Image: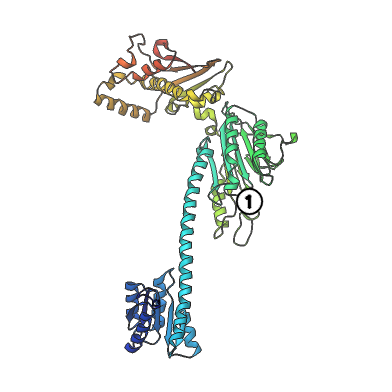
């Protein structure tokens, strides 16, 4: 039993035959159909371009000499139309000189046969071109699949980096008042910048540089951030924070990985800088009498199980208006097109010309961009400039007049414009070192504080009457008037006192005192469930949540007692 060896018509795809001689087209088309091709024809280059757009052939047979557009020019334009696809072009030509054949290949031809040619030779050339075409298609398909996988991986890395970055950076404070430059060399940043206030309002900043860059370098940032923020908010000393970070990294990282770091703590009075440099480039302190380097004096973190006792933080006297600049080695090692390092070429002039009246970050960016033009960034680049003024400190940010007095409490006094942005309950509890201890009660405590503070602001300082909210129109008018008075700038004060009584259970006392005229707090109270008025429900909710709520001094002071049970 025998089977036909003739390929099915069109089974090998579409062939485009371009020749101005009808006999040549007929003979070649007949042979190609017998070999399993579907055939379309053109008599010159212009028709070939039109047929290509219509038929999208798999292989093209091109005559060289034709009226109008010749075969070489047609091939040049066809190759442009092909784009990244490979469509083989075989020239069939009566030309025999070497120069003409070279020009055929240079115009985009993939092979050629000189007329007259043998059909057997032509068939073998077709098979060879099909192998090349099929290999190209196979590689193109794999490339598309690989490109898709790379894009998926890129999107996943971007998502992971966004989550990772938020986890590391969202707890930073005073970011709007710091000059920050962070340029990762890849999706993940191996440089880390952390900032946090101590309980007394002092500012602590850490700029770290992990070995290498990318994900493998960034992976250590999260445990470093956790330790830094938690311990700083509790008021732990510089030495203890550094020791804890060092222990974490020593346990976490392999032997060839570590973190160079520069930690600076600026006292809330703005009169002292405590600094520690472990393996980082020089930090710089710009003062009225000049620019002073702060060179590395300790090993990076994570190399040894314990820090050396001789590597204690150092101290310098500060003045308001001074500037502190910290940088990573990616900035110093940035190269221009000739391989010159920024730290050797542009950096010395910048530092020499720096005056404390002017920030250095913008000139630094301009100089760095000019230096690195037309080059690829090879390492993460990080820098932070700290201008010593009241805005960077916690006391200025929260309106603190005194913090964590003896007796296990803290007081916050907010004046005028500061009234618009009160601290959160979480911030004040952290000042007491209670953030973790009452974490499961934090939402409830935030609700209680929000209602008490809003009442003090609206009815005490802004003097907005509750009865305005008696109707839908009045409700809208109330909040419109509230926004107007806040925009005009509130005048007055609110003092918040938070104290704790040791448990179990822990008891939190919240006192809010405003500078308003007070109100009649002795009138009968309605239960929360029975109240139908659109006002007063917030305080009713507070009474339900708390063990007790009491007003004093004609209603200008309220104390809420909450037990963490």
Q: Position of residue 183 (x, y in %)?
A: 55, 49
Question: x%, y% of residue 226?
Answer: 57, 34
In the rendered view, tell whether residue 379 sits above or below residue 455. Answer: below
Seen at 45% across and 85% down, the residue is 120
Q: Position of residue 129 (x, y in %)?
A: 46, 77
Q: Looking at this view, is 274 or 89 the one in front? A: 89
SS category of the residue bearing label 1: helix
Q: Is the N terminus in the top left, top right, bottom left or bottom right quadrant?
A: bottom left
In this view, 86 is above or below 410: below
Quarter occupied by residue 357: top right
Q: Nearer the viewer, residue 291 or 281?
A: 281
Q: Note whether residue 149 is visible.
A: yes
Q: Residue at x 48, y 23 (%)?
A: 441
**Direction from residue 44 to residue 129 in the image, left or right:** right
Q: Nearer the viewer, residue 290 or 489?
A: 489
Image position of 488 with respect to 132: above or below: above
Query: Is any atom of residue 107 visible in this view?
Result: no
**Residue hosting label 1:** 332
Residue 101 rendering spot, x and y as whole percentages = 48, 86
Describe residue 565's horizontal placement relative to residue 481 as left or right: right
Q: Residue at x 58, y 30 (%)?
A: 230
């Amino acid at each position: 039993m025998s089977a036909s060896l003739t390929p099915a018509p069109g089974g090998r795809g579409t062939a485009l035959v371009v020749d101005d001689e009808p006999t040549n087209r007929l003979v070649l088309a007949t042979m190609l159909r017998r070999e399993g091709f579907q055939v379309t024809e053109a008599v010159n280059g212009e028709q070939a371009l039109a047929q290509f757009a219509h038929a999208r052939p798999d292989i093209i047979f091109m005559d060289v000499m034709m009226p109008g557009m010749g075969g070489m020019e047609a091939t040049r334009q066809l190759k442009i139309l092909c784009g990244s696809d490979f469509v083989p072009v075989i020239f069939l030509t009566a030309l025999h000189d070497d120069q003409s054949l070279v020009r055929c290949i240079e115009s985009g031809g993939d092979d050629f046969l000189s007329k007259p040619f043998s059909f057997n030779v032509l068939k073998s050339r077709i098979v060879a071109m099909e192998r090349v075409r099929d290999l190209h298609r196979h590689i193109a398909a794999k490339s598309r699949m690989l490109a898709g996988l790379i894009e998926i991986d890129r999107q996943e890395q971007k998502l992971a980096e966004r989550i990772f970055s938020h986890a590391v950076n969202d707890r930073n404070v005073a970011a709007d008042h710091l000059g920050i430059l962070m340029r990762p060399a890849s999706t993940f940043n191996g440089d880390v910048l952390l900032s946090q206030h101590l309980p007394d309002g002092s500012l602590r900043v850490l700029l770290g540089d992990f070995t290498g860059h990318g994900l493998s370098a960034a992976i250590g940032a999260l445990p470093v951030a956790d330790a830094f923020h938690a311990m700083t908010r509790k008021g732990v000393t510089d030495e203890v924070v550094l020791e804890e970070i060092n222990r974490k990294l020593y346990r976490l990282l392999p032997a060839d990985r570590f973190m160079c770091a520069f930690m600076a703590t600026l006292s809330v009075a703005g009169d002292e800088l405590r600094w520690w440099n472990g393996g980082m480039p020089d930090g710089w302190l710009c003062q009225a009498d000049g620019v002073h380097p702060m060179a590395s004096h300790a090993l990076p973190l994570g190399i040894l199980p314990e820090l050396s006792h001789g590597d204690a933080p150092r101290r310098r006297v500060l003045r308001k208006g001074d500037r502190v600049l910290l940088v990573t080695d990616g900035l110093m090692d940035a190269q221009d097109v000739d391989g010159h390092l920024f730290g050797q070429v542009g950096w010395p002039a910048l530092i020499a010309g720096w005056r404390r009246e002017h920030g250095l970050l913008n000139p630094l960016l301009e100089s760095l961009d000019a230096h690195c033009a037309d080059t690829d960034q090879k390492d993460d680049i990080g820098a932070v400039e700290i201008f010593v003024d009241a805005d960077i400190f916690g006391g200025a940010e929260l309106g603190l007049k005194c913090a964590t007095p003896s007796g296990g409490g803290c007081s916050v006094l907010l004046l005028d414009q500061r009234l618009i942005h009160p601290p959160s309950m979480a911030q004040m509890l952290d000042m007491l070192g209670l953030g973790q201890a009452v974490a499961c009660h934090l939402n409830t405590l935030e609700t209680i504080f929000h209602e008490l503070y809003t009442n003090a602001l609206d009815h005490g300082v802004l003097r907005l009457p509750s009865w305005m909210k008696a109707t839908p129109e009045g409700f809208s008018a109330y909040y419109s008037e509230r926004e107007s008075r806040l925009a005009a700038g509130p005048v007055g004060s609110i003092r918040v006192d938070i104290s704790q009584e040791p448990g179990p259970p822990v008891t939190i006392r919240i006192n809010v005192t405003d500078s308003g005229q007070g109100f009649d707090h002795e009138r009968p109270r309605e239960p929360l469930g029975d109240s139908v008025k659109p006002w007063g429900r917030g305080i009713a909710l507070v009474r339900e949540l708390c063990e007790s709520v009491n007003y004093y001094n004609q209603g200008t002071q309220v104390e809420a007692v909450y037990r963490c049970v």
